[in-house]
Amino acid sequence: MLEGVDMAAGRRIAERSGKTGPRLTGVATLLAGTALAAISFAVPQTAHAQTADQLGGLVQTNPDAQLLLEADELIYDNDAATISAAGNVRIDYDGTRLVADRVTYVENGGRLIAIGNVEILQADGTRVTADEIDITDDFRDGFVNALRVVTTDNTRFAAESAERRNGTTTIFNNGVYTACEPCKERPEKPPIWQVKAQRIIWNGEEKTVRFENASFEFFGVPLARLPVFTTADPTVRRKTGFLSPRFRFADELGFGVTVPYFINLAPNYDLTLAVTGYTRQGFLAEADFRHRLENGIYTLKIAGIHQFQPDAFDFNTVDTLSENRGMIATTGLFNINPRWTFGWNGLLQSDKNFSRTYAVTGFNDYVVRNQAFLTGLSGSNYFDARLMKFNVQENVVTGWDERQPAVLPSLDYNYVVGQPVGGGQLSFNVNTRGIVRENADVRTAFGDDSFALFGAEGNSWRMTTETEWKREIIAPGGLVVAPLLHARGDVTILDATGTGALVDSASGAVLGSDGTYWRGMVTAGLEVRWPILFSTASASHVIEPMAQVFARPDATFAGVLPNEDAQSLVFDASTLFERDKYSGFDRIEGGTRANLGIRYTGVLGGGWTAAGLFGQSFHLAGENPYATADLANAGTDSGLETDRSDYVGALSVRSDTGFAAAVGGSFDDDDFRLRRAEVGVGYASDVFSLSTRYAFVGAQPGYGYDFDRQEISASGSLRFAENWRVLASAAYDLEQSRLDRHSIGFAYDDECFIFQAAYVENRDTNNAVSRSIGFKLSLRTIGDLGATTDDLDF
């Protein structure tokens, strides 16, 4: 056996064989280089960490690397002009290992042949096996029999033979490619999917892979055949060429096929062009430009169509009004430094529903927020400034979109002093927002002679500054005393040109006349908690009675100023102990209020935990802000409009087995009648998951709901085989006795293949039904294929 043969040892062996050192040195180099040369036959799915030159077979090795050769014998045949290493040959060179029964160098023609159980393990983990490798000593041309390759990303390739030409092109004869691992129990079983081709031509210089007479097989069954197709080398992430087509169907559009074409303009910017042909509306053209810079990325997208049949849409809708429709949009996101980020997204279109009708990617949401923003975050300090304009993509000619405002600007700044002040935490907050609205958002469905103003026509601007100090003091016996001081001041400028000095005769709410309004509020608060611990050998329980009191004067201009950001008011256990229960800054809570409750947390043993809260809020003195008339009806039927609020409570349990349940609700303060409730139960495991929810909201005439609302919903999935799942969901309106929405689907997913299909049906408030069917097919390393049908009329 010869071990540790380096260049000097090679010279000594050559001298004993009667040959000069340089010749055997070349042999040793070639024997070592065999491993690297063979890698040039690897399939295009070689590990991404390799360079493009390596993937093209232009292997560069370290000339100073040490060679290690092991073999049973080294044979020199003078007559045949060959040098061979035979028997358990192993060559380690520059991080690559070659194992074979025999390796022979043929001087005439300069060929290197590895025969018998040939295996090459590259430094990155790529493994190549073959019965025989025959290659020229300059690694340009070669031939491989019975080639098999497994790369580091678990892609696999096999071929009866492979041939290399001109140092750049590799031809695989009768090749098979897949990204699926073989079945461990039955290795002979066909993979989930594979591509077979009579010839696969890999051009390492052009970075393309060409399949000739190819067939796609699933579970061993041929499903599609193509005479020829070419794709980019998967190791090249960005290459000019066609992308996978997409499909779509809608009754008004017809059947559509999208053909995208990707143009790699530079390593950091590209352009994607796409044309979608619709059988009823013609051709939709799209262009998407992306540019990545050192600290961020921005995009520009345009799309347009000349509609062949506008009358295919419903009469008197936005989609029917014009033949030529289009859009232009842009997005951006940049990191100024680790703390500051700025960006934007904007959409400008010929009408308010174009992007949604034609499902323009990234801009087909029902509500689109056009904005420019600047955000900073440092520890617990936060800054955010935004300019915003909301667009509702709807098909009615006049509707919600015309009532949407422009926000110029919205700004939030929060600063928490890093060191304690007076033993407590001191924080500052600033909020400002400007509103410009062309059309008032007035709704008249709240009674015969009443209305609600959710947005005034004209301009308004508000700036709020506030500071808060709070501290926790633990008294003897574990009693926690937390004093709080809060001060706030703001200014509002109102120019409600179209709706100034409005009065709702039913509620008495008044919108103030144009002008400048100053208001302030100071609050002194105290919170007292007394956590009591009960414990056993297997469980522990903490019961914590809590009480709060907040003393403050009445709020000025209550209900007079526009309410843009405090319209949503839900009083439940989560807001019971909030200092101000309004959701925004436009309304201020005034008067003296106390909150009482009891909180429970428990570790029950066996992996179970529980938490609960129950309590009530009391208006003690001054004017109750939740009973004060508000043009947006904030506070109406909230449970806070009386001196004694509704009772609120919540209870949840959880187990580490995957089970969880929660219940919450509010109850009338007089007769404990249920006003609002929500119950949820869920379980999740590797095989089965189920989530159910029941929601009840009592009648709220002040918001336009004269009847109770009840809904029960459920969703779940079941893994009925190793990689197969069935999924379903449904929501049922108990008051209307109808199924509002439901869906069912199934999915298969593993390391190489994903398939999903679903049927969805929705029913809107007008009882109109929309149905859709969709599927997605994803082959790892090959690409995705999906088709959807929207709003099918069954």
Image (tube, helix red, strand yellow):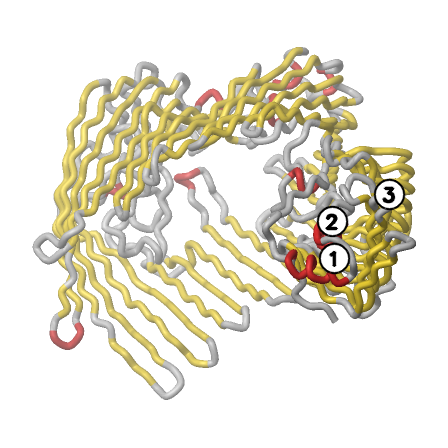
* Of residues 213 and 523, the one drawn nearer to the viewer in this rendering: 213
**Residue type for callout 3:** Gly
Residue 144: which numbered mark, if any?
A: none
Residue 39: which numbered mark, if any?
A: 2
Front: mark 3 or 1: 3
Residue 120: which numbered mark, if any?
A: 1
Which residue is pictured at 42% across the width and 58% down the height?
674
Disc 3 is placed on an element classified as: loop
* Of residues 239 and 57, the one drawn nearer to the viewer in this rendering: 57
Q: Give the spatial CA distance, label 3 vs label 1.
A: 24 Å
Quadrant housing residue 497? top left
Going from N to C along the chain, the mark reached first, 3 or 1, is: 3
Q: Is residue 593 left or right of residue 67?
A: left
Q: Is residue 15 left or right of residue 237?
A: right
**Residue type for callout 2:** Ile
Q: Residue furthest left?
A: 422
Front: mark 2 or 3: 3
